[in-house]
Amino acid sequence: MTILSKEESNRYIQQIRLPEIGITGQEKIKKSSVLVIGTGGLGCPVLQYLTAAGVGSIGIMDNDWVDESNLHRQILFNVNDLSKPKPLAAKEKLQLLNPNVEFKIHFSRLNKNNALEILSQYDIIVDCTDNFPSRYLINDSCVILDKPDVYGAIQKFSGQVMVLNYKSGPTLRCIYPQPPHPLEIPSCEESGVIGSVTGLIGALQATEVFKIILDLGGILSGKLFMIDTLNFNTQVSSFVRNPEFSKITELGEYEDVSLCNTQSVREISADDLNKMLSINPGIRVIDLRDKEDNEDIGYETIMIPHFEINSMINLISATDPVVFYCRSGSRTVSVINYLQEVYKMDNLYSLMI
């Protein structure tokens, strides 16, 4: 006996006609539960396609509010949603798309204290986050709970998709044992992204979810799919499960506290900098502020966005003093911590004006 109502059978008729789905497959979709973590450029299309296809229970997890800068790529939202919590605004739209789906709202930030409890409620986890601490937390939680993790990431005109821990397959740590340093890979907020690429990668993530639910072949388990839409180059790289890196029995620490260690940062006043410049005029002052923040600080500076430090390391002397400046000091601290940790530099100063 089918569990689909007549209205549902009519709604999903085009996908039921697929021999890979049929009535049995549609019932599997209805019985399934999926948690989407992140309601941004990736999460919006994932949620829309999962909802439209009739996934029975969908969890929506995010702790952010809708901002005007989101609208160019997070096409689930519009101007009437500004300042609304993203999960609640998403639920409002998705219920109109398909009232047969149950939505569970998790308006909170994923952390090591709530991850296992929340993820354990769902069959499949979709990672639509935009930072590496969250991605590794999701991966490790899925390994502990034995849940498949559908991973997506985008940057500028490029994107990637893979399925992690599927039937005890390779995990994120099998291909990237440790997360990159936060200043080595800029976020979308820092480097920018074209909205249509987020839609493309989100649609591919949703497709992998359906393949997992229906137990179809060709799932991107142990495979990293990459696409550069600017030149339309695609590549699939294979990787295998590493038993050593997959032995995860408890959650660790996922925030890089080294970026905010003020104790290791030497501060310098304008008077002391002037004295240093009188002896060594070649000392470089590097301005980490945004280009829009162009108030003259009284020194000839080199402007480098803080997230481009790694790619412009050749401009930073390893011997002569180097002075960094930003208005609040937070970017200076993170950059100096990074250079001290990764490049072992001890000639760095934070300018206090």
Image: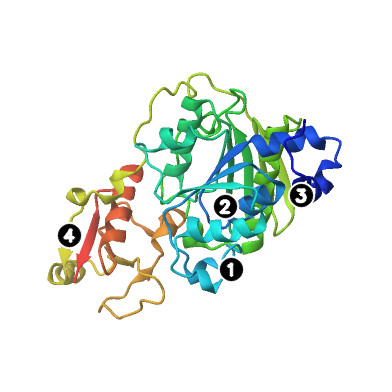
Sequence order check: which comes first, mark 1 or mark 2? 2
- Is disc 3 surrounded by few (<14), some (14 to 19) or many (20+) residues within 10 Å? few
Judged by depth in the image, the label closer to the viewer, 3 or 1, is: 3
What's the distance in space between the residues labelled 2 and 4, CA to CA? 42 Å
The residue that mark 4 highlights is: 267
What's the distance in space between the residues labelled 1 and 2, CA to CA? 14 Å
Horizontal side of 330 relative to 193 (left or right) equals left
**Which amino acid type corresponds to the residue marked 2 in the rendered image?**
Gly
Indicate the quadrant where residue 4 lies: top right
Please state the horizontal and vertical placement of residue 58, each as a whole percent of the image.
57, 44
**Which amino acid type corresponds to the residue marked 3 in the rendered image?**
Glu
**Which amino acid type corresponds to the residue marked 4 in the rendered image?**
Glu
Residue 92 shows which numbered tag?
Answer: none
Sequence order check: which comes first, mark 3 or mark 4? 3
Residue 72 shows which numbered tag?
Answer: 1
Front residue of this view, candidates 230 and 278: 230
The quadrant in which the N terminus is found is top right
What's the distance in space between the residues labelled 1 and 4, CA to CA? 40 Å
- Is disc 1 surrounded by few (<14), some (14 to 19) or many (20+) residues within 10 Å? some
What's the distance in space between the residues labelled 3 and 4, CA to CA? 68 Å
Secondary element at image label 3: helix
Judged by depth in the image, the label closer to the viewer, 3 or 4, is: 3
Please state the horizontal and vertical placement of residue 289, each as a whole percent of the image.
35, 69
Mark 1 touches mark 2? (CB < 8 Å): no
Front residue of this view, candidates 53 and 158: 53
Residue 43 shows which numbered tag?
Answer: 2
Sequence order check: which comes first, mark 3 or mark 1? 3
Mark 3 touches mark 1? (CB < 8 Å): no
Residue sitting at 69 percent across and 51 percent down?
52
Secondary element at image label 1: loop
